Amino acid sequence: MGGRRLDISTRALVMGIINRTPDSFYDHGVTWEWGAFWRRAAEIVEEGADIIDVGAVKAGVGPEVGEAEEMDRLLPAVEGLVDRFDVAVSVDTWRAPVAAEAFRLGAVLGNDISGFADPGYLPAAAAAGASVVATHIRLAPRVLDPHPVYDDVVGEVYTYLRHRAARAEAAGIPRERIVIDPGLDLGKDTDQSLALLGTSETFAGLGYPLLLAASNKDFLCGLLGLGINERREATLAAQALGVTLGCRVLRTHFVEATRRVRDMIAAVLEAA
């Protein structure tokens, strides 16, 4: 990622989430004001994040946020994070022009939940020497998908990610800069997300770093009947399982706790 070369053979990377949105599904805009944003960013770094993932448009349904508004929200955050902290900065955007500007300001990872729907995304990342996340989504960001249907959710997501990763390589992005994400909750119901989590070894077998974005997701509610502020333990359990099955990037709201889970499992794997 950028000038960093990170060994993920046994130790997963912790990706801390911070939002420049007033309507995030989890925090409902707690870091929307700049003072709160910078305080949380400093906490994420202090708690041991390897990556900060910053986004300015929520993935779910909500008021329209145009490209110019997304840039106004996101780019000062990227510039400030790069200037203030010695940590890799990821941008959660599916728009190529936004990603390109973020890369110019020093972001090193493009976390695109659309599966590279914007044809300019991969060329922008390749030109900047950035890494990318190829994510499976059934429809598109911000489109309601309440009843997703698959004949074989694991097989279909596997094929999709293999094709998206191949597209990234064809665009000039080396394999070691390509991360894959099965996209839990993104056009999946509870059972489908659980099936994907439980078969993480299958996706890790594709040979790319595997990202797990389970933190506070709705499938935890569907499984255990948990409210949005009751999903910490379930998140950590999902992360622990994911790491043992090959996940090597953990996108999380609970940075310190996730780091402790990561370190414990790494110690076991390194001692084996």
Image (cartoon, grey):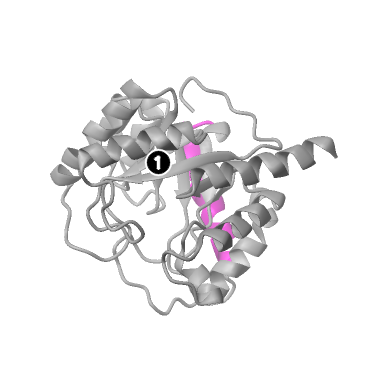
Q: Residues within 10 Å of mark 1 (few under 14, many from 20)?
A: many
Say whether residue 231 is left or right of residue 106. right
Q: Position of residue 136 (x, y in %)?
A: 47, 57
For the stretch drawn in magenta, the main secondary structure is helix
Q: Position of residue 13 (x, y in %)?
A: 57, 38
Q: Position of residue 163 (x, y in %)?
A: 52, 51
State whether residue 166 appears in this view: no
Q: Quadrant of the C terminus?
A: top right
Q: Please, is residue 194 above or below residue 1 in the view? A: below
Q: Secondary structure at mark 1?
A: strand
- Residue shown at the point (55%, 75%) measured from the top left: 224
State the residue in front, 217 or 137.
217
| Residue at the spot of label 1 | 53
State the residue in front, 53 or 98.
53
- Residue shown at the point (29%, 25%) measured from the top left: 104
Q: Please, is residue 79 above or below residue 216 in the view? A: above
Q: Is residue 162 magenta?
A: yes
Q: How many marks?
A: 1
Q: Position of residue 76 (x, y in %)?
A: 22, 32
Question: What type is the residue that disc 1 sits on?
Answer: Asp
State the residue in front, 228 or 207.
228
Q: Please, is residue 68 above or below residue 176 in the view? A: below
The residues colored magenta run 154-174
Q: Is residue 177 magenta?
A: no
State whether residue 126 appears in this view: yes
